[in-house]
Amino acid sequence: MKVKNLFKYLIRYTFLQTILSFITINYFDRFLFLNKDQKYESYLLIYEDYERFFNFLPANLITIDLVLMLIIFIFLGLLYASNFYTYVNELDFSYENKYIDDYLFLYLLWNSYFFSTLYIFRINGLSRLYLIIFTFIIPAVLLLFRNAEIVSNILGRKVSSENFISFNLQNDSNFRNLRILAYRNEKLSIKISEDNLFDAVISEVNNLNKSVNINLVVVNINSLKRLSPELEEYLINLNKKVLILSDTELIFHTNFIYRFMKRDSKYIYYFNNDVQYGSKYILKRFFDIITSFLLILLLSPIFLFILMLIRSIDGSPSIISQERVGLHGKIFKMYKFRTMYKNSHQKRTDLKDLNKKSGPLFKIPSDPRVIKKLQFLRNFSLDELPQLFNVIKGEMSLVGPRPLFQDDTKSFDKNYMRRLNVMPGMTGLLQINERDTDDFNIWYKYDIEYIENWNLYLDFKILLKTFKAVIEKSNSGK
């Protein structure tokens, strides 16, 4: 096992050990032991065994809590020794792996082990009703944290809401029952000659992703033994999940990480270059949710002041919503404090000749639509504060490329479409480096740099530099 994978397993193991131990110890203390005397009687029985078999250990280690932690520790060790728990294969057929089946297996496995250990350690005098309830809790927690899929669902990224596009995949193909396809929605099915596959994949994926969020690209190949170098490079750099089904074993031009298996005479290749998926997405969401919640509490007086200020100057509404393009092309409503006169966005087309920025960017010096008394909110990005609620909802992140209007994506080329494959953010590399640039190529440079180098440390560093940049700008009086 590689050191990186071993480290990931160790982190998950430690996390589960902590969670399950906390739940078990507290549940025993609150519900299972009917009174302190019964807990003490169980302790005396354990201490009796200690004196007979384990008296070489320090006596202060012999407590009910440590015994319960040991029970959890051993069970997790046995569980992690099996591929069943540590490995969920998205390339299995959907009817081979269902949550109810997994839960029942974990339930039987846990309770056969748990009741055996209660007997071995002679832990008696437990409430039978609460003991029955407890038998259901641990398997549920184990299933919840078995893989990133379930937690991602809870945090807002549901597999059932993800979409895919397919090329040359028959409607009656048994491979539509693969787990990776069965739980997702097909938005478009293309039948195309394999000679034109390269142009078709690029044009259809890009065009569809400008109006529909696409998470997975499926390509079925009959006679090709190699993808064209251009198509291979495009799929690798797409930052999406890619599934290739082939009648022949493929030879790739470049070395990259992918999963391979053969099922029903088909060669299956799968790779996932979605940079914010699985455990990475979960960690990012936890960081975003906790930080946003704290910022909302801390800045609530400023929120109230701005709300009342806007209302006193130009009436309601104080907060507006605008449709923007989010992760994988999903449209969402982004919140802002209103700093422009009402219905000002509808005048954008009439003022396009005054736009000084390139590409899809739109910004007018001394914009006549802006309420002058509220210009300072825009100068210090205070109008963006309501987007903290977008972050909590899972539509945005604290850090990422700025979300643009749907019309703006029409000018994206196949390379810049990659910006849709990370969560849009309130701030990013551009905002801490060249926030006021008029050059769309600068936007492109920083967005691609962020995508190719993203990690949680980078997010944290950008966030700190954003606070620093706002404070410095405030002090400079600009």
Image (cartoon, helix red, strand yellow):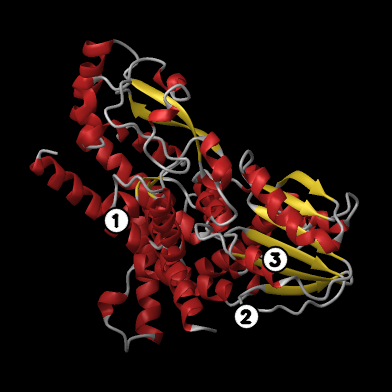
Q: Is residue 452 above or below residue 360?
A: below
**Residue at image location 60% in from the left, 60% down from the top:** 238
Considering the numbered disc 1 on the image, is that residue within a helix, a strand or a loop?
helix
Q: Can residue 393 be seen in this view?
A: yes
Q: Is residue 129 visible?
A: no
Q: Is residue 478 above or below residue 286?
A: above
Q: Distance between the residues labelled 1 and 3?
A: 34 Å
| Furthest-bottom residue in this view | 56
Considering the numbered disc 3 on the image, is that residue within a helix, a strand or a loop?
helix
Around disc 3, counting alpha carbons within 10 Å, would you say few (fewer than 14), some (14 to 19), or many (20 or more)? Answer: some
Residue with the mark numbered 2: 255
Q: Position of residue 388 (x, y in %)?
A: 34, 37
Name the kind of residue labelled 2 in the image: Asn
Label annotation for residue 462: 1
Label whose residue precedes the other's in the sequence (1 or 3): 3
State if disc 3 and disc 2 touch (CB < 8 Å).
no
Residue with the mark numbered 3: 231
**Residue at image location 27% in from the left, 59% down from the top:** 461
Label whose residue precedes the other's in the sequence (1 or 2): 2
Q: Where is residue 13 in the image (x, y as percent from the top left)?
A: 46, 70
Observer-nearest of 267 and 466 = 466
Q: How far apart are marks 1 and 2 (CA)?
A: 32 Å
Left or right placement of residue 134 versus residue 55 in this view: right
Label whose residue precedes the other's in the sequence (2 or 3): 3
User: Which picture quadrant has residue 22?
Assistant: bottom left
**Residue at image location 50% in from the left, 57% down from the top:** 276
